[in-house]
Image (cartoon, coloured by chain):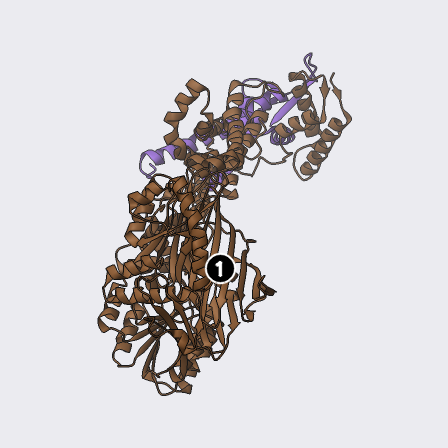
């Protein structure tokens, strides 16, 4: 039972991690350290910095995120991330899809397994 | 900017190399990711305000960042560490309290109990084995590991720690429940006296263990489920159960074996033979199963008496023939406490019972003299008992006498002075002894307890290294196999309640006018002061009880008569002893009963060898006493071929456990009684427990008179409860053990077809002096042996008063009379007893009558004067 649940959560997290990054940047740009600290505290996401930075790089290479460097008085220069236009589009589509999927899942539960 | 130590830089460099390698095949830009990570690390350092970045700091940060991963993790979810506000967290109060009650207190308690055994000495043994100690040690160990992991906030393997915590919970729960009854006493003790923390340690550490679990779970996501509580506890209980398994098996088996139902009883015995633990059975024999496993026991257990019978049936040995079990595990000063609380519940009873702590045999010497021509011997056995416990102890022993022997002297040393015993009726001397035992004074009692065996009881052996010394004088006829040689066997212990050290030796000195030959090499030839022959040496207890103590003495072949003027008789009389060669008679039917007890296995080849000496043409049946009896030869005409087949079957017979021989003897009696000349031959080991009432067997022998005859031959030293019950029956004959079992059996079989040498004693008036017959004048021991025969004859004819008076007059310990030494004249007067006069007790070597009378006058006068002065 526990093994099954663990494996399932791995798949779910794998699927939603990119969306979580895009959603975290939807309202405001964030620098890497801040973004990472926000995401690692999301319950159930179970992600580490070692995973997030390669993912941010992939999203940037894919053109879904843009970055800029800004000097900081409190430490090293900060790299700010924000979604690109394509990034926002895909984020909206992904959120819609996830919303539909969640609704459908809940309906199945409410109607004893009959989807209408 | 913080300073980086070179190892810290090297640590980060290695990490970046791994990042680069892992991203080589991915869509991510390795340089960009490394740059991002570098910035992240510096942010962490800035947030922690580190001035110097050490290798440890670098490792900690990198551990939090996690391993480089080009894809979101495909591993099962790993809990995220708790938010860290600083790399070196400040201690919180729970850390201290949990460490104190979950680690420090259990470790101190465990070490204290392990090295002192206080609880073991006072209540029960919580650590009966090293494995128990290790299981208990797992509680503080698990707690410490979790404490360290939670404190460092770098919990690498929470599942493993969760299981470990569950295991510790399981152990802690069992011990907390075990100590729960002490809590009401411990808490006031703690409050009032400041002590009592140790009994609370299991409960406090259990609470700490649960607290650790809570913190371990709290270090992860709110929904995180820490595994292993009940499975870990289950593992702990399985481990405890495995350690307790021998006890549980023993307990179940013992209860079955102690059942009133015969079938259940037999099942229990078989169960214990296959799976039982001897040590656990032994503890039950002493009624002290005070171990931690006893928490698994239920209801009322079996009594020590039942356990003692079961012990014999399972092991084939008497429970008191082996050293007592370790009843408590007290160590150091607590061991002394254990001694204080070990009572001897069988004190002043009729049984030797279990070994008593602190009581041992300090010295032993046997001084013997043999008149070979008269075929008479006399041995004095002087014993010293030592008691190192802090309680007064009673020394008890069953002593095997030589065949046909009688105790004729009993002496006790009181304040360094020898006091002789009073000889009187058995119940009278017993009552006197018991009364004095209650007053904690100095008595010693000797009574018979079966054919050729007596029970010696000495009380009190003083505590704290005190010594009690007594002497037993034994008058014995010699065993003659030929007219030119005779045998003497030394008395020996059959069972005892005191310890004999492994290296202990009995000192033996035997002298005779004729040459003496020892059976073993323990005794060497020497010369006595009157230039007579002597054998002297030292013998271990097993050697004294074995065939090594048999002494062969040469005698004049032509001396066939010995006589003595009996000065103990009120009327002048002469006692004569003739050596007669009795014609043997081959029985038509022989029923052999062989004991199937485990210890007999070594004797089967000797018995098988002796079977070839059975006369041909007789009817033979062979029964083996084994959980009832087993017939290995149905009744049939015997010949060499049959004897050979039976011998083969006997050699292959698998002896095991202990067995009641009574059912086999009852069946053998039925078979033997069918034939007018039928005999039974019972070959057996010690019979330490009377399991089935032997009264039926005795009844049959009593009513049938002298038929059928039962020849019993015992293969090893030890008590024989069945023989005790058959004491005094003329048809029960103990075959003497003089050599190898096969030889002794062969001699018995050969006596049936040839002539056997017997000693016939008779009494006559002085009108026809025996001297006129040309015989040899000997000592008063001959009169004592005649008196013994006469007492048994009178008792058989139910003339008990005459028999008892005769035993008293000759100062003999017989089935009707005993001997007791008391301390004061008042005690003797109160009991209606009169101690033997020193001038009239036997000595080694005993002078002939005329010299004895002279000596008596010389000793009697000063003794009377002293007696009057001392008021005794």
**What is the display colour for chain A?**
purple
Q: In this view, does B860 lie above or below B597?
A: above
Nearest the eye: B278 or B663: B663
Quarter in which the C terminus of chain A is drawn: top left
Q: Is mark 1 on a helix, strand or loop?
A: loop
Please count the marks in the image.
1
Residue occupying the far top of the picture: A73
Horizontal side, residue A56 vs residue A71: left or right = left
Residue B239 horizontal/vertical position (percent): 46, 44
What residue is drawn where x is 24% and y is 59%?
B801
Mark 1 burial class by Cα count in 10 Å: few <14, some 14-19, many 20+: some
Taking depth in this image into account, of A51 and B405 the one nearest to the observer is B405
What is the quadrant of residue B338 in the picture? Answer: top left
Residue nearest the viewer, comparing B857 with B68: B857
Kindly indicate the quadrant of the structure image that contains residue B698: bottom left
To which residue does mark 1 refer? B844
Q: Chain B drawn in what color?
A: brown
x and y, in percent, of residue B305 in the image: 33, 51
Quadrant where the image shows the N terminus of chain A: top left
- Write down the chain letter for disc 1: B
Quadrant of residue A101 in the image? top left
Q: Where is residue B687 in the image (x, y as percent from the top left)?
A: 37, 62
Q: Is residue B126 in sight in this rendering?
A: no
Whole-percent x and y of residue B256? 31, 54
- Asked whether, in this view, residue B240 is left or right of residue B261, the answer is right
Q: Nearer the viewer, residue B410 or B568?
A: B568
Please indicate, yes or no, whether residue B60 appears anywhere in the rendered image: yes
Q: Residue at x 40, y 44 (%)?
A: B867
**Residue B627, above or below A28:** below
């Amino acid at each position: 039972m526990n093994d099954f649940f663990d494996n399932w959560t791995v798949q779910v997290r794998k699927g939603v991690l990119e969306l979580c990054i895009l959603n975290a940047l939807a309202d405001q740009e964030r620098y890497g350290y801040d973004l990472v600290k926000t995401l690692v505290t999301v319950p159930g996401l179970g992600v580490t910095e070692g995973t997030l930075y390669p993912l941010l790089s992939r999203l940037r290479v894919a053109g879904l995120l843009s970055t800029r460097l800004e000097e900081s008085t409190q430490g090293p220069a900060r790299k700010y991330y924000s979604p690109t236009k394509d990034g926002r589009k895909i984020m909206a589509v992904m959120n819609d899809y996830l919303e539909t999927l969640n609704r459908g899942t809940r309906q199945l539960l409410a109607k004893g397994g009959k989807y209408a | 900017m913080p300073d980086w130590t070179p190892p810290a830089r090297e640590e980060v460099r290695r990490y970046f190399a791994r990042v680069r390698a892992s991203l080589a095949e991915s869509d991510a830009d390795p340089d960009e990711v490394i740059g991002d990570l570098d910035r992240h690390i510096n942010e962490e350092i800035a947030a922690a305000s580190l001035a110097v970045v050490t290798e440890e700091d670098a490792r900690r940060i990198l551990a939090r960042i996690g391993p480089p991963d080009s894809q979101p993790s495909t591993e099962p979810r790993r809990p995220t560490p708790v938010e860290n506000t600083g790399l070196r967290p400040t201690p919180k109060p729970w850390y201290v309290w949990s460490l104190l009650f979950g680690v420090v207190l259990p470790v101190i308690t465990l070490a204290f109990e392990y090295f002192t055994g206080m609880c073991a000495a006072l209540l029960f043994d919580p650590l009966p084995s090293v494995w128990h100690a290790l299981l208990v040690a797992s509680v503080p160990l698990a707690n410490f590991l979790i404490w360290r992991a939670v404190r460092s906030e770098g919990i690498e393997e929470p599942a493993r720690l969760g299981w470990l915590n569950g295991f510790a919970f399981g152990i802690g729960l069992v011990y907390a429940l075990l100590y729960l009854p002490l809590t009401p006493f411990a808490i006031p003790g703690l409050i009032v006296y400041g002590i009592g923390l140790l009994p609370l340690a299991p409960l406090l550490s259990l609470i700490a263990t649960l607290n650790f679990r809570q913190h371990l779970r709290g270090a992860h996501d709110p929904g995180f489920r820490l595994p292993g509580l009940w499975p870990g506890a289950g593992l702990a209980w399985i481990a405890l159960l495995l350690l307790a398994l021998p006890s549980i098996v023993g307990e179940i088996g013992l209860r079955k074996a102690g059942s009133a139902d015969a079938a259940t009883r037999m099942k229990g015995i078989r169960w214990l033979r296959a799976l039982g633990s001897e040590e656990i059975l032994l503890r039950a024999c002493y009624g002290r199963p005070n171990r931690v496993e006893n928490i698994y026991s239920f209801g009322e257990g079996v009594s020590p008496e039942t356990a003692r019978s079961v012990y014999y049936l399972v092991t084939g040995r008497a429970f008191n023939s082996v050293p007592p079990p370790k009843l408590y595990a007290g160590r150091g000063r607590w061991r002394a406490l254990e001694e204080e609380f070990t009572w001897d519940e069988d004190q002043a009873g009729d049984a030797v019972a279990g070994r008593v702590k602190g009581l041992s045999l300090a010295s032993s010497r046997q001084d013997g003299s043999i008149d070979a021509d008269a075929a008479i011997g006399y041995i004095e056995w002087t014993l010293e008992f030592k008691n190192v416990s802090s309680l007064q102890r009673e020394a008890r022993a069953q002593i095997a006498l030589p065949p046909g022997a009688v105790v004729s002297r009993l002496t006790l040393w009181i304040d360094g002075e020898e006091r002789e015993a009073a000889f009187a009726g058995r119940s009278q001397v017993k009552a006197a002894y018991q009364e004095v035992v209650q007053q904690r004074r100095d008595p010693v009692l000797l009574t018979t307890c079966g054919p050729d065996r007596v029970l010696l009881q000495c009380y009190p052996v003083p505590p704290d290294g005190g010594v009690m010394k007594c002497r037993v004088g034994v008058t014995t006829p010699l065993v003659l196999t030929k007219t030119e040689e005779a045998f003497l066997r030394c008395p020996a212990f059959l069972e005892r309640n005191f310890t004999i050290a492994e290296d202990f030796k009995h000192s033996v000195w035997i002298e005779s006018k004729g040459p003496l030959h020892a059976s073993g090499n323990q005794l060497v030839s020497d010369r006595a002061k009157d230039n007579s022959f002597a054998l002297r040496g030292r013998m271990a207890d097993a050697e004294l009880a074995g065939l090594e103590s048999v002494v062969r003495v040469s005698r004049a072949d032509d001396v066939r008569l010995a006589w003595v003027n009996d000065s103990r008789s009120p009327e002048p009389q002469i006692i004569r002893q003739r050596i007669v060669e009795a014609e043997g008679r081959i029985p038509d039917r022989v029923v052999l009963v062989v004991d199937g007890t485990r210890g007999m296995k070594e004797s089967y080849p000797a018995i098988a060898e002796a079977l070839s000496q059975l006369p041909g043409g007789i009817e033979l049946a062979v029964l083996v006493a084994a959980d009832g009896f087993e017939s290995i030869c149905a009744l049939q005409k015997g010949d060499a071929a049959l004897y050979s087949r039976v011998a083969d079957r006997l050699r292959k017979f698998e002896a095991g456990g202990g067995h009641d021989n009574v059912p086999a003897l009852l069946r053998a009696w039925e078979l033997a009684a069918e034939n007018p000349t039928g005999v039974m031959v019972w070959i057996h080991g010690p019979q330490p427990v009377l399991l089935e009432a032997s009264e039926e067997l005795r009844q049959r022998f009593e009513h049938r008179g002298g038929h059928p005859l039962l020849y019993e031959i015992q293969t090893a030293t030890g008590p024989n409860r069945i023989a005790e019950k058959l004491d005094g029956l003329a048809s029960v004959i103990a075959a003497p053990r003089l050599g190898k079992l096969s030889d002794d059996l062969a001699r018995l079989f050969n006596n049936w077809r040839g002539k056997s040498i017997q000693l016939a004693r008779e009494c006559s008036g002085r009108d026809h002096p025996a001297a006129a017959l040309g015989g040899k004048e000997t000592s008063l021991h001959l009169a004592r042996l005649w008196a013994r025969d006469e007492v048994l004859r009178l008792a058989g004819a139910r003339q008990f008063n005459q028999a008892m008076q005769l035993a008293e007059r000759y100062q003999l310990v017989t089935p009707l009379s005993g001997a007791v030494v008391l301390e004061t004249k008042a005690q003797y007067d109160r009991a209606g007893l009169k101690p033997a006069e020193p001038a009239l007790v036997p000595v080694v070597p005993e002078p002939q009558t005329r010299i004895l009378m002279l000596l008596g006058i010389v000793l009697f006068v000063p003794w009377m004067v002293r007696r009057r002065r001392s008021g005794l």
